[in-house]
Image: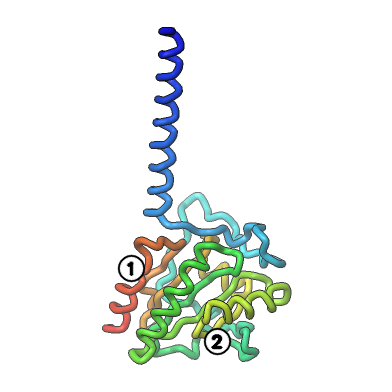
Amino acid sequence: MIKMLKRNLKVKSFLTSGRIALTVLVLALIVMGASCNSTDEIGKPGPVSINPPKPAAAGAPVALAALPPVVLEAELKAVNGRPIKLSDYGGKVLIVNLWATWCGPCRNEIPELVKFRNQYKERGLEVVGLSTENPEASAVGVKRFAEEFKMNYPVGWATPEVAVKLMQGRDAIPQSFVIARDGRILKRFVGFSAVATPQQLRDAIEEALKG
C-alpha cells in the first residue's frame, strides 16, 4: 500500500511539473511572438529560394539604415498587374511587409496593417505587401488571399534578390519595415506577437509621421 501511494505521488508530481513546463512554454511563445521560416514547405506552392549565405564568423550583417537602390528601383510584380516600385513612395511613411499565404503569423499581422492603412492614410502612410512565394505558382492564391483579407494596399511579390537584401540573413516571416519619409528604416519587426507587435508598430508609425 505504501509503495502504491508513493508511486501515485510521483505520477502526480510528474504531471504537475509537465503542466507547469507546458504553461511556461506557451507563455514564452506568446511574449516572444511567432514567425515562419520563409522556405518552410508547409503547403505553400512553388517557394522562391531566398536563403542567403551564412554570415561570416566576424558577425551578423550590419542592419540596413535605408532601403538600398536594388530594392528601391526593382520593378516587382503586383496582383493588379501594375508593377510595384518602392522608390515611387518617396516622401511617404512606408511599411514594407514580407509575408506568405501559408504563414500563420502573417495571417495574424495583415489585419493590423489593414487597420493602420485605414487610420493613417490621410497623414501620409502607405503599406506595401510583398509575398515571398513564387509569383507564377501562387498567383491565384495570393490574389484570393488579398481579396479575402481585404488588403487595401498594393500587394505583390518580392524577387529573391529583393528578399535577400531586406532579410539580411534572417529569413523568418513576417518581416515589417517602417520607413521614414527620408528613406531611413526606423524599425524592423521579425515575427508577430498579438500582445506586443501592434502597439510597437503603432508607436513606430507615429514616430515616422512626426518626422
Q: Position of residue 188 (x, y in %)?
A: 41, 68
Say which element carries label 2: loop
- Residue hosting label 2: 85
Is residue 23 toward the left or the right of residue 153 in the image?
left
Q: Is residue 3 placed above or below 76 in the rendered structure?
A: above
Q: Earlier in the sequence, mark 1 or mark 2?
A: 2
Location of the C terminus (image quadrant): bottom left
Q: Residues within 10 Å of mark 1 (few under 14, many from 20)?
A: some
Is residue 179 toward the left or the right of residue 168 in the image?
left
What's under tag 1, amino acid-wise?
A: Gln
Query: Would you say residue 181 is visible in this rendering?
Result: no
Say which element carries label 1: helix
What's under tag 2, amino acid-wise?
A: Lys
Of residue 73 and residue 112, the one placed in the foreground of this image is 112
Q: Residues within 10 Å of mark 2 (few under 14, many from 20)?
A: some
User: Who's the residue at 51% across and 70% down the image?
Assistant: 166
Q: Position of residue 126 (x, y in %)?
A: 43, 85
Is residue 187 toward the left or the right of residue 127 in the image?
left
User: Who's the residue at 53% across and 71% down the image?
Assistant: 98
Image quadrant where residue 176 sits:
bottom left
Location of the N terminus (image quadrant): top left
Image quadrant where residue 116 sits:
bottom left
Q: Is residue 169 placed above or below 29 in the rendered structure?
A: below
Of residue 149 and residue 41, the one placed in the foreground of this image is 149
- Residue hosting label 1: 200
User: Who's the residue at 53% across and 77% down the image?
Assistant: 149
Q: CA distance from mark 1 to mark 2?
A: 26 Å
Query: Would you say residue 175 is visible in this rendering?
Result: yes
Q: How many marks?
A: 2
